[in-house]
Image: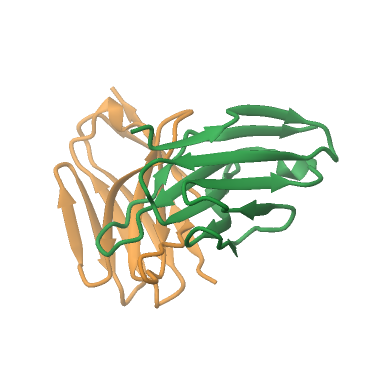
Amino acid sequence: NAGVTQTPKFRVLKTGQSMTLLCAQDMNHEYMYWYRQDPGMGLRLIHYSVGEGTTAKGEVPDGYNVSRLKKQNFLLGLESAAPSQTSVYFCASLLGASGHNEQFFGPGTRLTVL
Amino acid sequence: GENVEQHPSTLSVQEGDSAVIKCTYSDSASNYFPWYKQELGKRPQLIIDIRSNVGEKKDQRIAVTLNKTAKHFSLHITETQPEDSAVYFCAASISNFGNEKLTFGTGTRLTIIP
């Protein structure tokens, strides 16, 4: 059981470039989330998904797009990267059954936009 | 939307002493309150959580208390040890059919002084 994995671990982009971050989970979890973590600001929800084929906006969705074509994968896209998107990105997943409330986090992706 | 405030931002305690971290939330409909621990360079991990129908929950050296009337909840760590040094995040959410859309506090950096 790998749990939640994220690809890549590190990335440096130039302003205006695009990229996709991949999150994968092998726990058959229904819900998946993308957060960004900035110093002094905790974790903020970007987008989330309540099941395969669904996505919804979180607290800070601007500049990001997501897709959940397969239950086990949740992709986060940056179409035109900006320095303000320099951050550590965490993916998380949740089973989605009563009594199972823990969100399991991936190891994170450190993104720098120059 | 929900707003979660967390205090203090940094906390240093002598090994063996107790540590208390406090959070307040704004949305009275919130009913799920987890605490996450994040060691340096690692992913956040759930350490304890509480639902709004419970006033206190304990797990060995850690406990969480909830005051729904005042809309605040606290993390208590007793007999602190060096491995308790980390950043701790509180969060709040309105559980919706198993979906936990968490709003996080800004974190408390706890340092245990040997």
| Spot occupied by residue A33 in the image (x, y as percentages of width and height) | 51, 52
Residue B105 visible, this orientation: no
**Residue B70 seen in render:** yes
Task: Give the side of residue B41 with respect to residue B35, left or right.
Answer: right
Q: Nearer the viewer, residue B72 or B97?
A: B97
Q: Is residue B34 left or right of residue A91?
A: left
User: Would you identify the image quadrant in which residue A61 lies?
Assistant: bottom right
Q: Vertical placement of A71 versus B11: above or below?
A: below
Q: How far from the left and from the top, in percent, is residue A5?
A: 47, 35
Residue A112: % across, % down: 71, 32
Q: Is residue B7 left or right of residue B79?
A: right
For the point 18% across and 36% down, the residue is B79
Residue B69 percent across, percent down from the top left: 31, 77
**Chain coloured orange here:** B
Numbered-mark total: 0
- The quadrant the N terminus of chain B occupies is bottom right
The colour chain A appears in is: green
Relative to B58, is B6 on the left or the right?
A: right
